[in-house]
Image (spheres, rainbow, N blue to C red):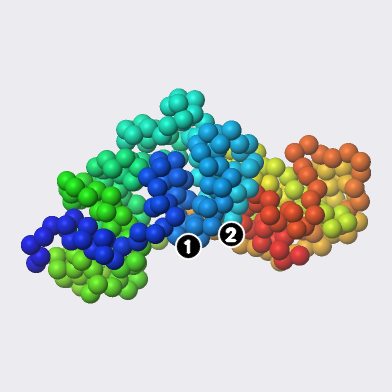
Amino acid sequence: MSGRTFAARLVAWQKRHGRHDLPWQRSRDAYTIWVSEIMLQQTQVTTVIPYYERFLRRFPTVRALARAPLEDVLTLWSGLGYYSRARNLHQAARVIVDTHGGRIPDVLEMVEALPGIGRSTAAAICVFAYGSRHAILDGNVKRVLARYRGVRGYPGDARVHQQLWRHAESLLPARHIVNYTQGLMDLGAGVCARNHPQCEQCPVCADCVAHVKGLTGKLPGRKPRRALPQRSTIMLLLQNAGEILLERRAPQGIWGGLWSLPEISNAREARRVCRERYGVTAIEVKKLPPVAHGFTHFKLTIEPICVRVKKSAAQAPGTVWLALADAVSAALPAPVRKIMLSL
Ligand code: SF4
């Protein structure tokens, strides 16, 4: 077993082999670090980079973000998924401007109190922006620590989660907190991959329980299997002269605030709904192949119906007619964009 601590080996490895050129590593500005941390939740680095750069060009400061309409924020987020992250980012920017004078607080508990920021994200922001000493525990870090310390069980279970937090706290070094935290992230994103970890390249393999005992395939424990409920909906693609009707969804709930297609519960209602709700006359009605979409808590099947319509002068509130090319670049849920691109 190595004589150096876990942290000392990780810090030395990060300095030599870790990532140093990611766009959000160029500054210690708390705002840009916060944006990157939110985007990186549930999303790969390579996907995030172009979104991050576009977002900061449009909203270079927290005040610019707070001033912007939510619609603009959602449009820039379009395609990244998990839109509640964008809504919370926008809401938190307004809280930061109204309550904290436009400066992201440097106290962990105050950062954690902002909308959409959990304990680990708050800790990462405080570490990278202010150099404060806090433990992080995102998905990748849970995997590294579960393997290194040999923690059994599914990390989503409260007991296992608590145990991992205790390990995360106990391994924290007194110095080099930025390299250490980045090292944990880098190790989890690369060497300690979910499948086929490269233990021979790992700085902590000498005393990693999973490696030493041959348990890397078993740790961390998998989520207990449970069949997800199935839901279905019918969406109307109203088309007129190359334009499509989009409808804004309610601010709360699934895909809140995004543009989407009108929904109905029964295909037989299509013509009546066109007339009564959208003031248009259906000329031709055609079913399209269903599209499946997975959420964390359920699976959704969308049955699209394409309806060629004749427009009237009046337009239903909360709707907009857009050319197909413009419609696909609006802030849309991913499966709705997929349906449009299949036309
Ligand atoms: S030795 Fe292997 S399993 Fe253990 S932390 Fe390193 S990469 Fe992960």
Identify the residue position indicated by label 1 in the image.
46
Secondary element type, mark 1: helix
Residue 157 percent across, percent down from the top left: 31, 50
Residue drawn at point x = 14 percent, y = 68 percent = 206
When the figure is inspected, residue 126 is found, relative to residue 181, above or below; the finding is above
Outermost residue, front direction? 26
Which amino acid type is marked by label 1? Thr
Residue drawn at point x = 80 percent, y = 59 percent = 306
* Quadrant housing residue 155: bottom left
Question: Closer to the N terminus: mark 1 or mark 2?
Answer: 1
Asked if the residues shown at circle 1 and circle 2 are in contact, with their CB atoms under 8 angstroms apart, the answer is no
The answer to whether residue 260 is left or right of residue 186 is right
In front: 266, or 286? 286
Label 1 neighbour load within 10 Å: few <14, some 14-19, many 20+: few
Residue drawn at point x = 7 percent, y = 62 percent = 3
The answer to whether residue 104 is left or right of residue 269 is left
Q: Quadrant of the N terminus?
A: bottom left
Identify the residue position indicated by label 2 in the image.
293
